[in-house]
Structure formats: C-alpha cells, structure tokens
Image (cartoon, rainbow, N blue to C red):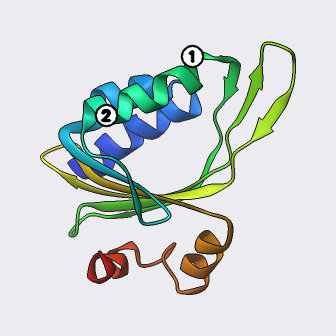
Amino acid sequence: MPEFSKVVQAQIELLQGGDPLGAIDIYYADNVQIFANSALFAENLNDCREKQAPFIDSAASIEGKIEDLYIDENAQICVFRNLTTFSTSDGQRHQIDGICWQRWKDGKIIVENYFDGEQMKIHIDNGIMNNPASLIKQI
C-alpha cells in the first residue's frame, strides 16, 4: 500500500474508533483551513481544536462509521462519507451524515471541506466520491 494511503487509513482507524480529537491532533497541519459547506470554519489547528473539543468532549460515546473512502494518491486528496453516531450524557443519539474532503501535504491535512445537506447532495451528484480532485478547481 502506498505511503499516502497508509496515512489516510491510520486517520480513518482513529475516526472509526471514535477518536476524532486524536485524528485532529495527529493529522491536521498547524495551518490547516477547515470549511463547512465551503464557508470558513477554522483558520488553523488551534482554532479548529477550540471549536471542536467542547462538542466532542461532551459526547458520552462516539461510534465512528466511515464509508465510501476514495484516495487519490497523485493529488494527495481523499474523500469519505462520515456516518458517525454520538450519544450525549442523557442518552440522546445524534447521527452525522456528511462527506469529508481532505487535501494533504507531507502527511498532514492542509485543507478540509465538510459537506452536508444539500451541498453534500450536489457534490455527490457531481461525482466527488469518485473524483475528489475535481473539487480543487472550485476552491
């Protein structure tokens, strides 16, 4: 398995294991830019962690479920469907349903764009799951 695929698979294992903060700490570059439906969500690793940690830490349990992983070795890009479920301390379960597009450099994520709802549907209909490099032209 090529090196890039190994790194992406290691990140996916953390997500599948319910450890998204571990994945953030290990695989996000210090200068990562995070987008939610193409709107800037976080400007760097610290900003991302500050916004994500309270939400993730409040979960009583996280059941990671990542599907439809596609890795573009040449472009150093991957895309996957995130269907993770988390439970709150009062027992309420919440289902995530989105696609995560990541551009990597030197073993770290430098750009991530998470799409859900109508934006997810549009990108899936436009073929992002089979050709994630097509999004490069759009950002």
Q: Secondary structure at mark 1?
A: helix
Q: Can you say which quadrant of the picture contains the C terminus?
A: bottom left
Mark 2 burial class by Cα count in 10 Å: few <14, some 14-19, many 20+: some
Q: Residue furthest right?
A: 91
Where does residue 91 sit, x and y in percent of width and height? Answer: 87, 18
Q: Secondary structure at mark 2?
A: helix
Mark 1 burial class by Cα count in 10 Å: few <14, some 14-19, many 20+: few
Where does residue 69 sit, x and y in percent of width and height? Answer: 51, 58
- Given residues 27 and 113, the one toward you in this image is 113
Q: Is residue 115 visible?
A: yes
Q: Residue at x 68, y 47 (%)?
A: 83
Q: Residue furthest bottom?
A: 126
Above or below: residue 41 compared with residue 68: above
- Given residues 18 and 110, the one toward you in this image is 110
Above or below: residue 72 compared with residue 63: below
Alpha carbon distance from label 2 to label 1 = 16 Å
Residue 103 left/right relative to 14: left
Residue 108 left/right relative to 126: left
Q: Residue at x 28, y 76 (%)?
A: 136
Amino acid tagged 2: Asp
Q: Is residue 1 visible?
A: no
Amino acid tagged 1: Asp
Residue pointed to by mark 2: 47
Where does residue 92 sit, x and y in percent of width and height? Answer: 86, 26
Residue pointed to by mark 1: 57
